[in-house]
Image: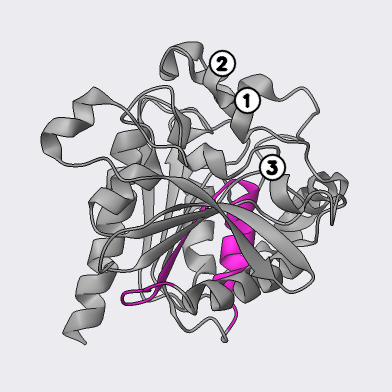
Amino acid sequence: MATHGFGSDVAVGAVPEVRRIDLAAGELTLSALLCAAENPRAVVVALHGAGTGAHYFDGRAHPDVSLLALGARLGYTMLAIDRPGYHGSTPEFPGGQSISRQAHTIAIALRNFRADHEMGQGIFLLGHSFGSAVAMTMAADPAGSEVLGLDISGWAAHFASTPKPDTVRMHWGALRLYPPGTFRSGAAMLGPEPPGERAEAFDWTTTFAAVASRIAVPIRVTFAEYEAIWRHDAESVRELRSAFRSAPAVLVDRQPDAGHNISLGWAARSYHLRSLGFFEECLARRNMN
């Protein structure tokens, strides 16, 4: 079992252990990274984007980058799941699953996870890029009543332009946005994209509004300063806000000095703290009611 060894964290507390686990999910076994807190406030379930994996949320290029370690140190059990078709489940299901099927599979995995782990007050969903569509679909399901809030980034309602196979610059932005060694240490998080995901991403703009309208928990949407894949002009943001008409709160944030892959850049700690702060607000609102 691997542990972090970053000296800068020692002065402010023990560094939580990030370990790989398997999650039973019906016909599939999903791989995941778990960083557990004692007596957790809640469980944060993080869902990665296309072509990456759970390690996206446990960046190793710098001690400030890992969402999993930070969240656990602040009292949350952090669970980053390799979505169906990635890493552990690839041999069983190399073609992946549709967005709706992924949401169903992960919901089964979480029911099984709940049987053996403390859940605190419930579940927060945090999605990046394609994982945001799965997180939104899970939050829109009335059966997911234990979901307390939703935080997404790198995903919206309308593409800024037609995505092309050569989208490295669009996803990453300038190299100065990332700690040295990001791309050398990132091999563990990369994986082939299941063939159906790109086509389904193109279809998302026709289903976004219907999914968004059914989400009845607080939601936060973050756009990186250098987000190049999705539209985030004033008109698009107004349309996006209005689509979440059942949500009790809708926040739209901007993350300075960040590209599409926010959680791997120098801005990661700031973004993660804002996400966890949003979850704290959700808990406070829940405890007051």
Q: Is residue 266 left or right of residue 238?
A: left
Residue 122 highlighted magenta (yes or no): yes
Q: Residues within 10 Å of mark 3 (few under 14, many from 20)?
A: many
Which quadrant holds the C terminus? Answer: bottom left
Residue 118 tag number: none
Residue 248 highlighted magenta (yes or no): no
Residue 99: percent from left, percent from top: 73, 62
Residue reaching furthest to the left? 11
How far is disc 3 from disc 2 in space, using C-alphas?
19 Å
Disc 3 element: loop
Residue 210: percent from left, percent from top: 66, 72
Q: Residue at x 62, y 25 (%)?
A: 187
Q: Are marks 3 and 2 in contact (CB under 8 Å)?
A: no
Q: Residue at x 84, y 56 (%)?
A: 92
Q: Residue at x 54, y 39 (%)?
A: 55
Nearest the eye: 106 or 144:
106
Residue 138: percent from left, percent from top: 59, 71
Sequence-wise, which precedes: disc 3 or disc 2? 3
Q: Is residue 81 left or right of residue 168?
A: left
Question: Which residue, given by chain and number where applicable, does mark 2 sit on?
Answer: 184
Q: Is residue 2 left or right of residue 91?
A: left
Question: Which residue, given by chain and number where applicable, does mark 1 sit on?
Answer: 187
Residue type for callout 3? Ala
Question: Which residue, given by chain and number where applicable, does mark 3 sit on?
Answer: 50
Residue type for callout 1? Ala
